[in-house]
Structures are given as structure tokens and as C-alpha cells.
């Protein structure tokens, strides 16, 4: 039996848990710790710890990748906190579009609420049906519309966080501009819960614009894709709201493994597919602009073919193709996932090198937010195989580092990539991060072993930090 | 009367040439007319106006009625198989109907006709207008969606068939044209299953969901559509007076579904069934 304190004045209660036999991880008993009374009074935190819910719980709070893609690093004695019952919308200002809500609100519910008010959330991702906004903020989630609405560092106006010692830090401002002192909320955004637990969020939401158009396009090579992106930014300008790409391997995989989808461009095979979405206030103006741009691109040879969605159902079908790739990859077998930020002109070179290196052993699938310079490189194989892994790592990280890219564009570091941080950040920077972590969480109780490498983290008194396998 | 003599035999021999070969040329030049309607997009959440006079249509995404899309797709497939020479898309409604017709042209229709009328239109008025268009254009086949998703009337196809005195095959899930007999074999989706009808052409066919999956509007076709003609007419041009004997008095939301009730015993269930639901 072990005691872990998060804050003072805690009461503990033991809950016996059921094993989920399918989950092949070592499992130890968890204890519920009740957070300090003052907070309990107005937070009603329900800490229900069942194994089936523990697993997705970590996911929902946003530590998805730190848990899912790691080997078993769950050491003894961890408490998992699921904020799903803190799901109230606290206020919404229709004039400014500022939404204040608790961290456990599910993104899709927020989107529906805002829909009634004539606004939208500034981020949108495939997991919207289950992810909580607290997790999105803690992991600085990117999503499909970053190219238009920017990252959460820009949209989040304030947050309330609970520190490791129980202090409730109220930075829940609703002001667009506030230059009074250091803007600490940015530390918590993207810290993956390792500096504090985000409990409330205030977000600036954009108005919902009525005219949305979506085109599914084909290009013959990667250079055309890049030129298309520059042209789109210039010609479509303010109405461009998404620019995604997928290659032919991704397309084939999705059509093979997912039901109810058909190829929008069945007449021939294309090497690259691009999704361009525009959002604006005047249907006729946007459609005209988009059509003119697309027709010009075909004439100049940037595009080989394309279709334009004529109604919302067709648009959803096109999005399903792009958003369904992760699901299709899971169905195809084992997958090694890499989320990289690279200079746009170099992005596909990496994919081709990996293909050359792995040959017939693996299916190298590439897709991503081309508009943000973010590549999702996925290597799909029948089974997990260490010999394949050694060919991929550290080659992928070194390649990315050489081109001054990021080894984790939006997915974060978590457990799996914590010790790889030096590929993208200098020693001095990492050391300063560790100093900040020690300041805010001296006992290292918040998400241990995640985000920062073991070389800079303090040794925990009770146990040795796990050596990397 | 006398028995059949040599003179009667001569009459038989002078009959016009083979029926099939004459009709082959006729079906190859057959024109198909497709009526399409501009409606609120299927995926939009409908809101009733505060004054209960109708639903909110301003600033709401409008698209081609899904069943009309299926009808147009079927017409295009028939044309692509060589059985028709031209597909004409027609629509009746306000100025913005032109957008929907442009989509139809982008899918592959050859030309379009827009009968402009900004007011409320009911199926009988549409049927009368379509009859005037059919009389002018003389198509061999008139395709429509089985119903529009905004009013769910499911009347226009049947009414126009009546006005034209043409055979009708409604809720079609399969359409096969037989060139030689100038007949359409239509599988209809009915409550009990499938019913197969043979219709002499010209005929009216209304389409159901399972007939086909409409194609997407490709960029090359969108480009071609820009040079296709949309003819503009008004009901007066067709000598039709739009009037209706129907008036919409009020539109309200359906009552909100009440939450279910969890009962604690069978006795309570029987009591509720007897006294509240009154089914026992």
C-alpha cells in the first residue's frame, strides 16, 4: 500500500479494480485520493477508478500518445485523475465569442453548444467525440483547422490550474489583451499535465460562417502539392480553412479497411491527394473564388483532377477519407507512428528514404497537415518487429534533427519520446525546462517520466526511475 | 364476312418495315428530362422561425434534393449507355435555383431550364409547369426524385403522370430500358418488398434511394458546365397561373421526447399501462 499526496488535507479511499485481460500491461492497485476540501466544495470531482475506465481515462485527459505509444512504463503506485464530471459550461459571451468552461467538457459537446449560438471551436480533430478540452489544452492539440485559427496558444485566453502542492492558480482571464507580468498560462498549454492540472479554460471562439466548400484534388508529384499550397494561400487567402494531404498508400489503405467509402477520383490512380476547405460568409463569392482557383490550377498543370463537394454529405465523405487513416492503419496490423514538423520542401524526401530503406518489409504511409508543415509518417507492418524498428529509429529522429524539424509536431513527448527531446531542443533549453519542473513539482508527482528526459529529472526518493529498455 | 382472300394478304405485306429498326433510331435520339429541386441541405439542423410561419431558410446551406440527384444520375447513366441523346435538367423556383442547375450541369446534364417563381410552390403547380415543359420539349422519359426532403409530399411525379396521361413507376430501385419494345422495366420498392412493372414509354419514373449512387461533380465537368445553357422562363411564358388551394397556417417543432421512466416493480408497470397509457 502506498501513499501519494497531491496536495494537503487529503483523504484516501481504496477501490478494488477489475482487470481487463486484453490489456497486456502490468497493473497495480490504484487508490483514490480526494483533492483538498476547498476545491471539492465547488468542483465535485468524481474520481472513479475502474480499469476499463483508467485506460481511456489517460487518453481522454489528453495523454493519449504518452500512454498509447509507449512500452509499458506504468510503474507502481500511480493515481489517474479523470475530470469527466467537471463538464459544465460556465459562461459564454455572444458578443466577444469567449467561452469559459470546465476542463472535462468533451470537445464535440462544446462544438454543439456553440453551434446553437452561431460560433465554432477554433480546433477540430478526429477524436472530438471523446477528448476533453482540458486535455486538448494540456497537449496543445493541433487539428485540422490550425492553418486558419492558429494554435491554442493563441485561442486560449486564460485557464485555471491546480499545482502539485494543491494551490489553485486562477489565471482564468477573459481578456484579449493583458500584458501584466509573465503570461504563465503558456507554460501549462502543451505541458502534458506535468506542471499542473488544468481545471478550467477560457477560449476565444470564432463565429460560425455559413459558406463551407470542400475540394478533393489530385496531384502528380509532391512539388505540385507544395506549389498548390502557395497558390492556395495567395489566391484563396482569407477563406482558406484547411489544407491536408495524403499519399496513394494512405488512400489505398483507407479504401481497403473502412466500409462505406468510395474513391472520389476513381478514373485513375493518383500519387497525391489534397483536401482544400474554404470557410467564408458569402456562398457565391467563395464558390466563385474556389472554382476559379481550381480551374486555373488544372490549366497550369498543378492539379491532374479533382471534385468539388456539392452538399454536406459529400463533404463529410471526403473528410472521412482523411480522418479515417489512423483507424485504417490500426486495422491493417502493427503501426509505427511518427508526427514530425519539417520544412515543407523536404517533407516527402523523408518518406521516400524510408520506403527505400524498408522496401517490401513495410508499407510506408504518409499524410498530414501540409498547410502547417506537419507530416504524419506511419509505417505499417503485419506485426511489431524489432528489426524493423531499428531501421526506423533513430534514423527518423536524426533526419528530422538534421533539418531542424520537430520530432513531435502536435502529439507531444509523453513517455515514449521524453528521452528523445534533445533531437529538437538544445541542452540549455531542456535544463531550464527541468528547473521549472522542479520549481512547480518538486516531488515529481505529476505525470512522472513524461515530457522531460530522465537525465535532467530529479531522482525520486522511493524508487529508481526506470531505465529505458 | 368472307374468308381471308389474296387481297387481304397483299395488305399485310405492304405494312411498314420492321418495328424494331424504326424505334431503334427513335430511342437513340430520346431526350430525358429530369426535374430537380433546391432544398435545405440534408445535413443541416432545421430551425423553425419564431413566428411559426415556416422554417429558417436564410443563411442556411441549400443543395439539390438527394432524390433528384439520384434521378439525374440515372438519366446520365442511361445516356452514357447510348439509349438517350440528351439530358435536360429543369427546376422551378427563385433565382438561386440556378446554382442547383449548375450542379446538375456539372454532373453532366446537357442543358437546363429554369422557370423562375419567387413565391411558394406546391406539387400541383409544379406538375402543371412540368407538363407545359414536357409538351414543348417532348422527352421520352421524365425522371424525378420520389419526394423532396423539405415537404416530403411525394406527389409531383404522380400528378404529372396523371396530367400527361403517361404511365408511372414510382419508388424505382432499378430501371432497365428495353430499346426494342420501347418499354421500361421498373423495380419498385413497396412496403411488402419489390414490385416489377413494365411501362410503355414515354413514362414518368420517380427514384428511390437504392437506385444508384450519384457521381461527384468533377472539375473538368464544372469547367464544361460554364458554357452550357440555362434557359430562363416564367410561369406566364408557359401560360400557367400559379395558385393554390392550400395555405400553411402554422409550423411547429415536434414535441420534445420525454425521458423514459424507470419503474420499480411489475405492479407499477401494470398500473401505468392501465391508467396512464390506457392500453390495458
Image (cartoon, coloured by chain):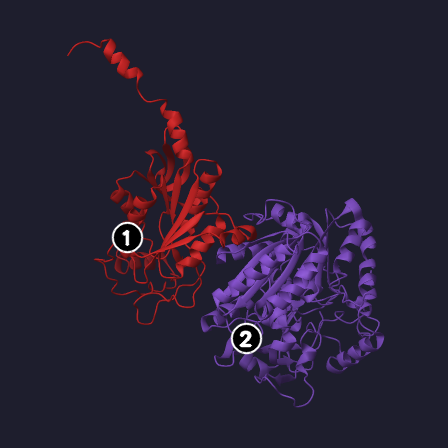
Chain colours: A purple, B red
The residue singled out by tag 2 in the image is: A205
Mark 2 residue crowding within 10 angstroms, few (<14) / some (14–19) / many (20+): many
Comparing labels 2 and 1, the label whose residue is closer to the camera: 1
The answer to whether B209 is drawn above or below residue A116 in the figure is: above
Secondary structure beneath disc 2?
Answer: loop
Horizontal and vertical percent position of residue A118: 47, 72
Residue A364 left/right relative to B54: right
Residue A133 image-quadrant placement: bottom right
Residue B274 image-quadrant placement: bottom left
Q: Residue at x 33, y 64 (%)?
A: B255
Q: Residue at x 74, y 67 (%)?
A: A413
The residue singled out by tag 1 in the image is: B238
Residue nearest the observer in this picture, B231 or B269: B231
Residue nearest the observer in this picture, A151 or A307: A307
Q: Residue furthest bottom?
A: A180
Residue B94 left/right relative to A213: left
Can the viewer see residue A156? Answer: yes
Give the Cα separation between the discs numbered 2 and 1. Answer: 51 Å
Residue nearest the observer in this picture, A170 or A166: A170
Protein chain holding label 2: A
Horizontal and vertical percent position of residue B51: 30, 71
Horizontal and vertical percent position of residue A41: 54, 82
Amino acid at each position: 500500500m502506498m501513499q501519494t499526496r497531491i496536495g494537503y488535507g487529503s483523504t484516501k479511499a481504496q477501490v478494488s479494480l477489475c482487470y481487463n485481460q486484453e490489456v497486456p500491461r502490468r497493473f497495480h492497485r490504484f487508490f483514490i485520493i480526494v483533492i483538498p476540501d476547498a476545491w471539492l466544495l465547488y468542483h465535485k470531482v468524481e474520481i472513479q477508478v475502474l480499469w476499463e475506465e483508467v485506460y481511456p481515462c489517460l487518453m481522454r485527459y489528453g495523454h493519449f500518445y504518452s500512454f498509447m505509444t509507449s512500452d509499458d512504463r506504468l510503474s507502481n503506485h500511480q493515481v489517474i485523475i479523470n475530470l469527466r464530471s467537471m463538464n459544465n459550461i460556465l459562461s459564454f459571451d455572444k458578443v466577444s465569442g469567449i467561452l469559459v468552461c470546465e476542463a472535462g467538457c468533451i470537445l464535440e459537446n462544446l462544438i454543439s453548444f456553440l453551434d446553437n449560438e452561431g460560433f465554432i471551436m477554433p480546433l477540430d480533430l478526429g477524436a472530438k467525440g471523446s477528448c476533453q478540452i482540458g486535455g486538448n489544452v494540456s497537449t496543445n492539440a493541433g487539428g485540422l483547422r490550425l492553418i486558419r485559427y492558429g494554435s491554442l496558444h493563441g485561442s486560449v485566453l486564460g485557464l485555471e490550474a491546480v499545482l502539485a502542492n494543491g494551490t489553485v492558480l486562477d489565471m482564468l482571464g477573459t481578456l484579449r489583451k493583458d500584458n501584466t507580468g509573465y503570461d504563465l498560462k503558456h507554460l501549462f498549454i502543451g505541458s502534458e499535465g506535468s506542471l499542473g492540472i488544468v481545471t478550467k479554460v477560457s477560449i476565444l471562439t470564432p463565429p460560425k460562417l455559413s459558406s463551407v466548400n470542400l475540394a478533393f484534388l489530385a496531384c502528380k508529384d509532391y512539388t505540385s502539392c507544395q506549389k498548390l499550397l502557395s497558390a492556395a494561400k495567395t489566391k484563396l487567402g482569407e477563406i482558406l480553412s484547411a489544407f491536408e494531404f495524403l499519399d496513394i498508400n494512405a488512400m489505398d489503405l483507407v479504401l481497403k479497411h473502412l466500409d462505406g467509402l468510395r474513391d472520389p477520383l476513381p478514373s485513375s490512380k493518383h500519387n497525391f491527394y489534397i483536401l482544400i476547405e474554404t470557410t467564408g460568409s458569402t456562398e457565391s463569392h467563395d464558390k466563385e473564388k474556389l472554382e476559379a482557383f481550381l480551374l486555373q490550377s488544372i490549366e497550369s498543370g498543378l492539379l491532374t483532377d479533382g471534385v468539388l463537394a456539392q452538399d454536406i454529405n459529400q463533404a463529410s465523405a471526403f473528410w472521412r477519407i482523411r480522418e479515417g487513416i489512423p483507424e485504417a492503419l490500426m486495422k491493417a496490423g502493427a503501426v509505427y507512428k511518427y508526427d514530425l514538423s519539417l520544412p515543407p520542401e523536404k517533407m516527402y524526401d523523408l518518406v521516400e528514404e524510408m520506403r527505400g530503406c524498408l522496401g517490401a518489409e513495410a508499407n510506408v504511409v504518409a499524410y498530414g497537415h501540409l498547410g502547417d508543415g506537419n507530416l504524419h509518417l506511419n509505417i505499417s507492418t503485419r506485426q511489431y518487429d524489432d528489426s524493423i524498428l531499428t531501421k526506423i529509429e533513430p534514423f527518423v529522429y536524426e533526419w528530422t534533427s538534421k533539418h531542424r524539424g520537430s520530432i513531435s509536431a502536435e502529439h507531444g513527448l509523453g513517455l515514449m519520446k521524453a528521452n528523445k527531446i534533445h533531437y529538437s531542443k538544445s541542452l540549455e533549453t531542456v535544463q531550464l525546462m527541468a528547473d521549472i519542473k522542479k520549481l512547480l513539482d518538486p516531488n515529481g508527482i505529476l505525470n512522472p517520466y513524461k515530457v522531460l528526459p530522465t537525465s535532467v529529472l530529479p531522482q525520486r526518493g522511493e524508487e529508481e526511475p526506470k531505465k529505458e529498455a | 364476312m368472307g374468308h381471308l382472300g389474296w387481297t387481304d394478304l397483299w395488305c399485310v405485306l405492304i405494312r411498314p418495315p420492321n418495328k424494331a429498326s424504326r424505334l431503334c433510331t427513335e430511342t437513340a435520339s430520346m431526350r430525358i428530362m429530369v426535374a430537380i429541386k433546391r432544398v435545405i441541405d440534408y445535413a443541416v439542423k432545421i430551425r423553425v422561425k419564431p413566428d411559426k410561419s415556416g422554417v429558417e431558410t436564410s443563411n442556411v446551406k441549400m443543395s439539390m434534393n438527394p432524390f433528384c440527384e439520384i434521378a439525374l444520375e440515372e438519366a446520365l447513366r442511361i445516356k452514357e449507355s447510348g439509349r438517350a441523346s440528351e439530358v435536360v435538367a429543369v427546376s422551378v423556383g427563385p433565382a438561386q435555383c440556378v446554382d442547383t442547375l449548375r450542379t446538375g450541369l456539372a454532373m453532366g446534364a446537357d442543358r437546363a431550364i429554369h422557370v423562375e417563381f419567387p413565391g411558394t410552390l406546391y406539387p400541383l403547380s409544379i406538375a402543371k409547369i412540368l407538363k407545359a415543359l414536357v409538351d414543348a420539349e417532348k422527352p421520352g422519359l421524365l425522371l424525378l426524385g420520389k419526394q423532396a426532403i423539405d415537404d416530403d409530399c411525394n406527389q409531383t411525379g404522380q400528378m404529372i403522370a396523371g396530367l400527361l396521361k403517361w404511365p408511372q413507376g414510382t419508388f424505382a430501385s432499378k430501371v432497365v430500358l428495353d430499346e426494342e419494345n420501347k418499354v421500361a422495366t421498373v423495380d419498385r420498392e413497396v412496403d411488402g418488398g419489390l414490385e416489377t412493372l413494365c411501362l410503355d414509354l414515354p413514362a414518368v419514373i420517380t427514384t428511390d434511394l437504392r437506385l444508384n449512387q450519384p457521381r461527384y461533380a468533377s472539375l473538368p465537368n464544372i469547367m464544361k458546365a460554364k458554357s452550357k445553357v440555362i434557359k430562363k422562363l416564367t410561369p406566364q411564358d408557359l401560360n400557367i397561373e400559379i395558385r393554390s388551394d392550400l395555405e400553411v397556417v402554422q409550423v411547429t417543432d415536434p414535441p420534445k421526447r420525454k425521458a423514459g421512466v424507470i419503474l420499480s416493480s411489475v405492479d407499477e408497470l401494470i398500473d401505468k399501462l392501465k391508467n396512464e397509457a390506457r392500453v390495458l
